[in-house]
Image (spheres, rainbow, N blue to C red):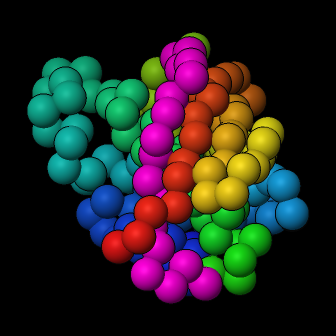
Amino acid sequence: MDIKELIPQREPFLFINKIIDLSDDSIVTSMLFHEDLDFFKGHFPNNPIVPGVILNEHCFQSGAALISSKSNGDFTNKLAVVSRINSAKFKNIVKPGEVVTTSTTITDQLDNAAYFKSITKNAEGKKVLIIEFACTLVEE
């Protein structure tokens, strides 16, 4: 399934390249952080790394794609927005040219809110980020 069928984000703020696996309660996504991404110019010029907030956004977009897939992408007049971050643990840095793979699972769902846990790993299988968060569906 194409990620653009599930979430409204587009380049330059789309941080999922590929959906690897999708089930009722989990999604596995990946992102290649190309060397030419604009944020590398300033974060940091002599030692560029992917900003933590971008890694968070990658997880948030994965969660939004998962709940969108549960409704067959039909979020007519609704938008999934992050409403809570319970914890975020950064374990390793991500450099230009690296690929990360993220497993995101729904841990709970209530009415218009879904709670998630994401684990992001680098190509060597080392954990980069572990984050627990919630998304809420709001009227556009």
Q: Residue at x 81, y 64 (%)?
A: 22
Say whether residue 17 is visible: yes
Is residue 78 within the magenta segment?
A: yes
Residue at image coords 55%, 49%: 135
Number of numbered labels in the structure image: 0
Left or right placement of residue 43 versus residue 139 in this view: left
Q: Please, which residue is most extreme toward the front here?
A: 111
- Position of residue 96 in the picture relative to residue 112 (left or right): left
Assign the magenta stretch its main secondary structure.
strand
Give the residues drawn in magenta, as a range.
Answer: 74-90
Left or right: 8 as drawn, with respect to 74: left
- Expressed as whole percent of the image width and height from the top left, the position of residue 58 reads 49, 47
- Quick one: quadrant of the N terminus? bottom right
**Quadrant containing the C terminus in the rendered view:** bottom left
Q: Which residue is drawn at 36% across and 33% down?
A: 53
User: Can you name the residue that lies furthest to the right here?
Assistant: 24
* 114, above or below 21, in the image: above
